Image: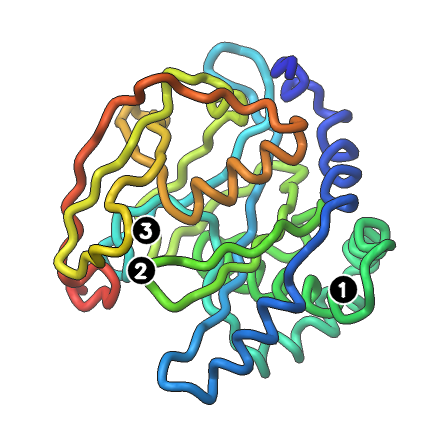
Amino acid sequence: MDITIFERKDVIPSLIVNKLAAIQLDYKEKYRQIKCSSKTAAPQLAAGVVLLLNYKQMSSGNSEYVFQLIKRSNRVSQAGDISCPGGMLHPLTDRLLSGAFTTGLFPALSSEIARSTADKDEESVHLIRLFLTNAVREAWEEIGLKPWRVSFLGALPCYSLSLIARTIFPTVCLTPEPFAFRLSSEVEKILEIPLRAFFDASKYALLELETPFSDPLHSNQFPCIILTDAQGEKEILWGATFYIITNFLRIISNNSLPVPDSPAIFKKVLSKNYISGNSR
């Protein structure tokens, strides 16, 4: 893929809408599994996240599309991880908000959803609206993203975490204009990462985890990518967010992501409070 396409402001949104509209979603199946699990001893939880894109002028002087990600603070679970804004589904609240947010209050957003889900069945469209509402509500709380400041581009397949009983329902949105981030105590900082960074094979690595709750049936090595923030500090992106972003890029680039040779290995020790977040 010619990655200079990420510099073309007017091309990328329509490309993403068309690519995401053509994929099959598993929202219905995953959500039904979650509802069934609520009656078991090991219930699954659902969470909506929003993969945010923005067209931004870089320090090089060029403008291009970037992902707007957050680094989780030490006040929450999974502290230190890089993630998309979002959080747990609140079924009653998000259903009530969804009616106003995605159909009534913001007609432009409603039109975007209708356009990008034209080939989806009614139940899938309902769930896309629900988890978009969930994700943007959480993003408003975490970083001050206003619902009327986003354009909806489509939904991505779900991702189920291996360390936590949680399934993530990702949506993709564009922030057409820059906005002033208002970070909650759950967010340490914002990272704005160019899409082109994921097409550089030298940035890929393997993350070797040491955890107090390791499962011998699962690998302790995970693919990751090494990123650099605006201050030049190195950050490791792995896990669900790594999967969501690379899956998104494979879809829009016709599977053009690089396959790194002999990636470097980085080691990370997870504390016993990593999942619970009780360290706060």
Label 2: how many residues lie within 10 Å, few (<14), some (14-19) or many (20+)?
A: few
Relative vertical location of residue 118 with respect to residue 57 in this rendering, above or below: below
Relative vertical location of residue 27 with respect to residue 199 in this rendering, above or below: below
Determine the secondary structure under disc 1: helix
The span from disc 3 to disc 1 (Cα, nearest Å) is 30 Å
Q: Which residue corresponds to mark 1?
A: 125
Label 1: how many residues lie within 10 Å, few (<14), some (14-19) or many (20+)?
A: some
Residue 62's spot in the image, x, y percent?
A: 57, 13
Q: Residue 72: which disc?
A: 3
Q: Which residue corresponds to mark 2?
A: 163
Determine the secondary structure under disc 3: strand
Q: How is the image coloured?
A: rainbow
Determine the secondary structure under disc 2: loop
Q: Residue at x 45, y 72 (%)?
A: 45
Residue 130's spot in the image, x, y percent?
A: 65, 68
192 left or right, relative to 149: left
Relative vertical location of residue 261 with respect to residue 247 in this rendering, above or below: above
Q: Can you tell which of label 3 and label 1 is closer to the viewer?
A: 1
Q: Earlier in the sequence, mark 1 or mark 2?
A: 1
